[in-house]
Image (tube, rainbow, N blue to C red):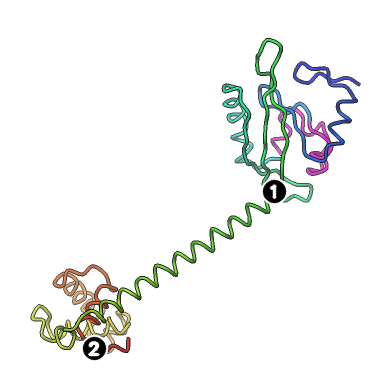
Amino acid sequence: MNMDVLGVEFTSEMKQVLDWVPAMIWVAGPDGDCRHVNRAWLEFTGRKLDDALDRGWLSMMHPEDAAAWHGLVAEAIRGAAPFTLECRLRRRDGRYRWLLKTGQPMFSEQGKCTGFVGYCTDVSTQKQALESLNQASEKHRSVLVNLREAVSVIEDFLHTDTHSAKAHQDDRLTPRQREILHLIARGYATREIAAQLHVSVKTVESHRAQLMQRLNIHDVAGLTRYAIRTGLVASDL
C-alpha cells in the first residue's frame, strides 16, 4: 500500500526499510504533526502507528515538552535548518525517558520546507549521570565554603599577637555584653544563653544586636572570629 508523506510517495518498501533501522525514526509535516514513525519507535512506546499519527504522539510526550513542540518546529521551519532538542517520551512501561531528538528539514522541488525527518536517541542515563555529578559538585563547593570559613577563623587567631586581653579592655562593651559574646563564641544558642544568665531571650537578642552595632560586625560568625582574635575565648575552639 502506498502512502503520501510530505508529498513523496511512501511505498511499502520504504516503510520496510525504516522498520529495519534499529533507531527510532520519525517524520513530521510542516505543522509539526506526525506523519510516520518506524517500528523501533512503536516498540519503545508500546503503541500502534494510528495512535501516533497527527497529534497523537503528543499524548506520549511529557506535557511540558508536548506544549512546546509545535513552537519549536515552527521556529525550525522559519530557519529551514536542522534542529536538536531534548524531550521526555513515555516508554511502554509508563516511565518517561529523556530522548535527544534530531530533525532534518525536507524540501520540495520549489525549495519550500515540507517538514522534517529525524531520529531519537535515549539519553536518560547520561542525564542522570550529569545530575549526580552536579549534585556532587554542589556538595564539594559547600565543603570548600565551610573550610574557607574555618581557615579564616584560624588565621585570624594565629596572625593576631594582641589577643590576650583586648576584649576585656574594650570599653565599647559592657560586662554583660562580654559575657554574652563569650557564650556566643562558645556556640551557645540564644535560649541557652538566656537560661545560663537568668535573663530573657529578648534581652540576649537586644545585647547581641548592640554588640554587632558597636563592633560593626554583621553576623554570628564575625562575632566568633572577633572573640577568638581578641582572646575572649580560649584557643581550644
User: Residue 21, position in %: x, y?
Assistant: 83, 37
Measuring 66% from the left and 41% from the top, which residue is drawn there? Answer: 100
Q: Could you tell whether 57 is left or right of 227 in the image? A: right
Q: Residue 66 or 165: which is nearer the viewer?
A: 165
Q: Secondary structure at mark 1?
A: strand
Asked whether residue 50 is drawn in magenta, I would say: yes
Q: CA distance from mark 2 to mark 1?
A: 60 Å
Q: Which mark is residue 211?
A: none
Q: Which residues are magenta?
A: 37-59
Q: Residue furthest left?
A: 171
Asked whether residue 27 is drawn in magenta, I would say: no
Q: Could you tell me which quadrant the N terminus lies in?
A: top right
Decide which of tag 2 and tag 1 comes sooner along the chain: 1
User: Residue 158, position in %: x, y?
Assistant: 26, 81
Which amino acid does the dot numbered 1 rest on? Tyr
Which amino acid does the dot numbered 2 rest on? His
User: Residue 188, position in %: x, y?
Assistant: 32, 83
Task: Give the quarter of the image for residue 176.
Answer: bottom left
User: Residue 227, position in %: x, y?
Assistant: 23, 81
Disc 2 versus disc 1: nearer the observer: 1
Q: Which residue is mark 1?
A: 96
Q: Which mark is residue 198?
A: 2
- In the rendered view, tell whether residue 220 sits above or below residue 10: below
Q: Residue 216 or 133: which is nearer the viewer?
A: 133
Q: Secondary structure at mark 2?
A: loop
- In the rendered view, tell whether residue 127 sits above or below residue 105: below
Q: Could you tell whether 230 is left or right of 128 in the image? A: left
Q: Could you tell me which quadrant the C terminus lies in?
A: bottom left
Magenta span: predominant SS is helix
Q: Residue furthest top?
A: 110
Q: Residue 28 or 144: which is nearer the viewer?
A: 144
Measuring 26% from the left and 70% from the top, which residue is drawn there? Answer: 219
